[in-house]
Image (cartoon, rainbow, N blue to C red):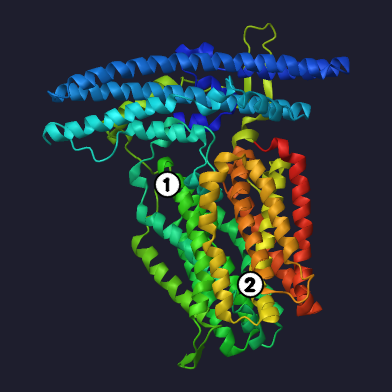
Amino acid sequence: MHKNLLNMVAFGKKLKQGRIEEWQGYYIDYKLMKKKVKQYLSQIEAAGRLDHQHILKDFKRMLDNQIETVVLFMLEQQGHLASKISHLNKEHESIQDEPDISKICELREAYRSAGHDLLKLLYFVEINAIGVRKILKKFDKRFGCKFTDYYVKTRANHPYSQLRQVFKHVGLGAVFGAISRNLADLQDRQGSYSSIYDQPPILHQDPVVDLIKSAIDRLTQSTNFLNFLGQHALIMQEELPSPSEELVDDQTYHFMSLLLNLMNTFLYMVNTYIIVPTADDYSMSLGAAATVCGIVIGAMAVAQIFSSVYFSAWSNKSYFRPLVFSSIVLFVGNVMYALAFDLNSLALLLIGRLFCGFGSARAVNRRYISDCVPVKSRMQASAGFVSASALGMACGPALAGLLQTEFKIFGFTFNKVTLPGWVMALLWLVYMICLCVSFREPAREADANPNPNESSDVQDKIEKGLRQSLLLPSTENEQDSDQECDVSTADQECDVSTESLEDSRLPANSLGSAYRLLTPSVKVQLLIYFMLKYAMEILLSESSVITTYYFGWTTGTVSIFLACLGLMVLPVNFIVGSYISNMYEDRQILLASEIVVLFGILFSFHLIIPYSVPQYVCSGLIMFVSAEVLEGVNLSLLSKVMSSRLSRGTYNGGLLSTEAGTLARVIADATITLAGYLGESKLLNVTVLPSLLICVGSIVATCFTYNSLY
């Protein structure tokens, strides 16, 4: 019930209801600051003109005071925690030589109690940090200025910054380290000196440690490699999940089902790119031009535009059935693709690729991770999703390079153009069998945990303590809107937000409502995503035609080139996620990556005769690597600036980004086919020119929205 309460109310009420009663006076006064913003607007409307410098000065002073109150109280509580742990450490030292089971148990409970106190403090800091971000965004939106950029720059980088304390929570990590180390040490000691009849065996680290670690990870929004890959998947989460949401019942999490979900992602990416090295040869063998390969490759993306929507909707009811349906459709599509050669039918070839696109279950793959994987493992699962996609992208062309043989069985031809279809059909058949044997349909929320009284004693204690400290009781008659009524005023005036609860919290129920939630910043990020997918699709899909025309490359050589590009995805993301993103802001990396993509596009034009292999390979590497860097940072920023309403439901952020990328691929593949009518000698420049124009447009749009990307 408490979980649903936190998820259903807007932030104003979430802040009010999530307050710890004895800490009431130390939270930011979100209501007061909203009223101040409203007063500024009223004064401007009444006077017609008001000194903006006066407004900025007054708002800065008020916000500085609010943050100072939060920080000083946080430091005070941090000191209390440090003192408490120091006292417990002395007791811990005193039992080193003469271990006593009862004292060890008492100490563990005392350290757990300190862990609960730290968890309360982390939620206190988190909810205040979110409040600061939201009031800054509200101020920018109402006044149409870039105050947030100025405020964050001047405060966060100052040597005596208090804002840094709110967002970086210096010192709390050390407190967590002390608690987790001592709990682990006492657990080992208890295991060494107690009988199995005294205490049940403990197989995992203490639950409170998992809760604290999850809260710290969410608060810091750290940008290490794992988190960077996870954000790359654009699997969005609630901004402020409740503590009970983090205690996901392990019985609903099935690791083998997750592996099968990721295997679906891997096989689909293999299926997408396995035909790229031979699509032009297949087209010519059926009497079409080599550039028809654009339509052959792009047919899968055309169908994916529609399949993403119905698979996303289907995942609201089931995960197993959509995955089985996906496997069947992909099996049929690949068989049709392979049979087109013997039947000499270009139409059957295209229909087969359309069927493969209709089997795209990537929306289900994302949704499964978002809904069925525990919070503490979700980032690893998201990183696995990205890694599976990257590995599939590399293995597809590599596998095509190995299928360079020709033979017949029962009149069916098996050669370099049909074998990709036959091999993928076999792989999908095997996958479908594994799916039916090993996949476990997760219980829906209404079915999960039918008897809540059977939870473990430890979880009961944690839930009870967190409910008492973090969630205040509510009445059934509370208003369903982001408004807070000041009952002390004579006219019972309410500060009503611009959005009602129904509009501000419920997921988008159509593409139109999802589009209306897109701010200029989000639209620019989707444009960037469209641009990079367009540029990458042009590079990959026409690679066989271009290299054959200019350099006489064989299918094997093209396969090696494409496989090398695919294998660069993870190393590049590792460098960006582990090093570059820790030195620069996301928006700085974003703009720099766009400029490098632009350089790679310019370098790929055929302006110098003859067109050389080093020029093509270098320009392709520059474009592909910078586009990969750009994609990771772009999706990371997109997850931050996108409305929380797009984190769930059928029309979610993942679906929108998938549709934008898929549309880019469709247009790119169509461009290749249309440009082929001008001749292969002009194909390269004609197809790269739109990439150049879109890239320039995205750079200009980024500059206009740069200050809102935080």
N-terminal of the two: label 2 or label 1? 2
Crowding around mark 2 (Cα neighbors within 10 Å: few <14, some 14 to 19, many 20+) is many
Give 435 or 200, whichever is nearer the viewer.
200
Q: Is residue 692 left or right of residue 321?
A: right
The residue that appears at 18% across and 31% down in the rendered structure is: 189
Looking at the picture, which amino acid does disc 1 mark? Val
Marks 2/1: CA–CA distance: 33 Å
Q: Is disc 2 in contact with disc 1, using a CB cutoff of under 8 Å? A: no
Q: Dot 2: what SS?
A: helix
The quadrant of the image that shows the N terminus is top left
Looking at the picture, which amino acid does disc 2 mark? Ile
* Residue 139: quarter of image: top right
Q: Which mark is residue 470?
A: none
Crowding around mark 1 (Cα neighbors within 10 Å: few <14, some 14 to 19, many 20+) is many
Q: Position of residue 246 (x, y in %)?
A: 42, 36
* Residue located beneath label 2 in the image: 297
Question: From what the image shows, is residue 207 above or below residue 46?
Answer: below
* Residue located beneath label 1 in the image: 373
Q: Position of residue 151 (x, y in %)?
A: 68, 25
* Residue 596: quarter of image: bottom right
The residue that appears at 13% across and 24% down in the rendered structure is: 97
